[in-house]
Amino acid sequence: MREAKLDVRSTAITVVIATLGGPTLQATIDALNRGTIAPAEILICIPEKEAAHVQISAAANTKIVVTPCRGQVAQRVIGFQQAKNEFVVQMDDDMFPATDCLEMLLIAIFSQNNIAVAPALVNCRTEQSVYLTARNVGFFNWIYYFIMNGRAGYKEGAILKSGVPIGLIPNPDVKGMVEVEWLAGGCVMHRRSNLVLKNYFHFPGKAYCEDMIHSHLLRQSGVRLFIETRSACGLYLVSAFDDEVRQFFRHTKAEMAVRRYFMKLSDRGTARMYVFYAALVLRYMFKYLTKKSGMQVEH
């Protein structure tokens, strides 16, 4: 094992970050460079308008790639095309990889051909899985997942029949690689030969559900998807339920259009998807009215 790790640590990695220059970009770069394997190159793919204002440290391995387009997937594809190394990591600008995150992903991807591998995602505030609340038990939760996915119900690592992706909550008794149906796009390692080098996202605005589309295209091309549970990457969760009413409905409408496209692409019916959105809106309105009522009582 010691020899394998030494070999892994001599491997050059390219990290591609598609960004608009968000406030956590520098912290993400710093976290990468503190790792047991620092990337050979970090490509910051950013549109020209934002590139004029972005400020990052002048690390020797960091390069700004000015893109003629705006959009997470389109920017990332340009970075993929310019990657020099055999192993390429796509990463969002608000991710905080553990010090051995890339090393563990490399060990995993060395173990098999034609795979993409991602770390377990951890809530920076709680240091627990970001998906922990999904595994609630109880009759109403069972009914909900029955509607969302039929008899299979709640299924980790899968995309349900309603088009809802369920993340993997690492089991402390089962450490290693777990095959899944989709990978969240925040941090994924690929072999360069397996990269999707076309812009598959043609919707305006935020890239909703792009990770499900990307996962579908990778699997179609024969690439298997895995979570390496011994690798971890942190992020701060933001809930759609914190949005104001107009913002919530605007975002939900845009997301639904993309998810409907994914359902067609993956040959799934949309009836369960619409039930999911009906339940989502009801949950939001309940929380919103409860919060508003509480505020009125205080005043």
Image: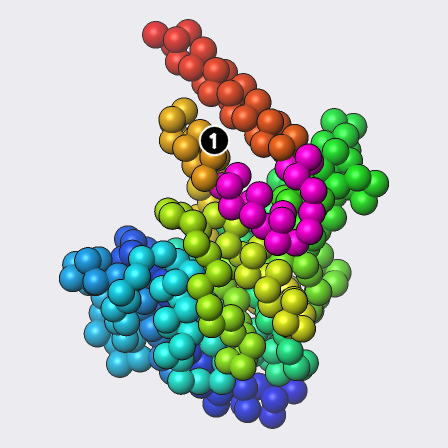
Q: Which residue lies at the image location 48% right of the left edge and 35% below the top edge?
A: 252
Extreme residue in the right direction: 151
Describe the element under mark 1 as helix, strand or loop.
helix
Residue 100: give x, y in percent of width and height.
Answer: 51, 72
Residue 43, by quadrant, is: bottom left
Q: How is the image coloured?
A: rainbow
Q: Neighbour class for label 1 at 10 Å: few (<14), some, many (≥20)?
A: some
> Is residue 91 positioned above or below 34 on the image?
above
Q: Which residue lies at the image location 41% right of the left edge and 24% below the top edge?
A: 245
> Is residue 203 positioned above or below 228 on the image?
above
Q: Quadrant of the N terminus?
A: bottom right
Q: Which residue lies at the image location 46% right of the left edge and 56% below the top edge?
A: 201
The reply, left or right, for residue 199 in relation to residue 4 is left
Q: In this view of the protein, which residue sits in the foreground, 166 or 148?
A: 148
Q: In this view of the protein, which residue sits in the foreground, 180 or 129?
A: 180
Residue 171, by quadrant, is: bottom right
Q: Quadrant of the C terminus?
A: top left
Three-letter residue code for mark 1:
Phe
Residue identifier under label 1: 241
Asked if the magenta segment contains residue 257, the reply would be yes
Can residue 267 be seen in this snapshot?
yes
Residue 207: give x, y in percent of width and height.
Answer: 44, 51
Q: Which residue lies at the image location 31% right of the left edge and 68% below the top edge?
A: 44
> Is residue 224 positioned above or below 69 on the image?
below
The reply, left or right, for residue 227 in relation to residue 14 is right
Q: In this view of the protein, which residue sits in the foreground, 134 or 231?
A: 134
Q: Which residues are magenta?
A: 255-273
The reply, left or right, for residue 170 in relation to residue 138 is left
Residue 130: give x, y in percent of width and height.
Answer: 56, 48
Total number of numbered discs in the rendering? 1
Residue 34, by quadrant, is: bottom left
